Amino acid sequence: IGIEGSAALVARAAENARLNQLDTRASFRTANLFQINPQAWAALGAFDRVLIDPPREGALEVCKAIAQDAHRPTRIVYVSCNPATLARDAAVLTHNRRFRLTAAGAINMFPHTAHVESIALFEPYDEQSAEHFEPRAGLPAKVDKSPSAASDIEGDVTIQIGQPAKAGSNR
């Protein structure tokens, strides 16, 4: 399911799904996610995975609704063009240990500007695995500048928080 605030973009997404023969597996709706509440979010159904790609204003209300939902997605990928709103929304998701930030990165898609795209991965907080994934206080996040971690754009940095994924995992 795709949810977008613009009816024109919903129509384009539906047409794209049809052209790629995905229209039986994908559906799209128009909704104002800046005004969504936990009850409206729960009414959409239970999601296993969520991709959030908001405008610069962020996705505060969506994050509040997800954090209060009884069904926690197994993975949330948050793509942001505004690191400040990503940080704000991450605080909502991680409050009361509902989710944990397991990886984050920044991509310089707009050279010669101050704008970057940030990507963060959240997973449900699990008491049993918390000691294996949470960074220890006072230690910086690992910065990987290897060619395999960065894209073709010079200056990209991948930041990994916690331990790397195990071989064969689908991260």
Image (cartoon, grey):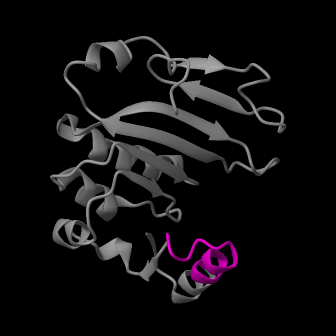
- Left or right of 122 on screen, residue 96: left
* Residue 153 covered by magenta stretch: no
- Residues 33 and 114: in front is 33
Q: Residue at x 55, y 43 (%)?
A: 119
Tell me where residue 5 appears, x and y as whole percent: 46, 80
Task: Answer above or below: position of 73 versus 139.
Answer: below
**Residue located 49% across and 41% down the image:** 120
- Please identify the quadrant where the N terminus is shown: bottom left
The residue sitting at 22% across, 39% down in the picture is 98
Question: Which of the two residues, 72 or 15, is positioned nearer the viewer here?
Answer: 15
Find the magenta span and give its range. 13-25
Is residue 13 positioned above or below 148 on the image? below
Up/down of 71 relative to 144, above or below? below
Q: Is residue 97 left or right of residue 170?
A: left
Q: How many marks?
A: 0
Q: Is residue 22 above or below residue 79?
A: below
Would residue 137 be seen by someone viewing this image from the given angle? no
Is residue 142 in sight in this rendering?
Answer: yes
Q: Out of 55 and 30, give the one closest to the viewer.
A: 30
Residue shown at 44%/11% (left/top)? 139
- Give the quadrant of residue 20: bottom right
Residue 80 x %, y %: 54, 52
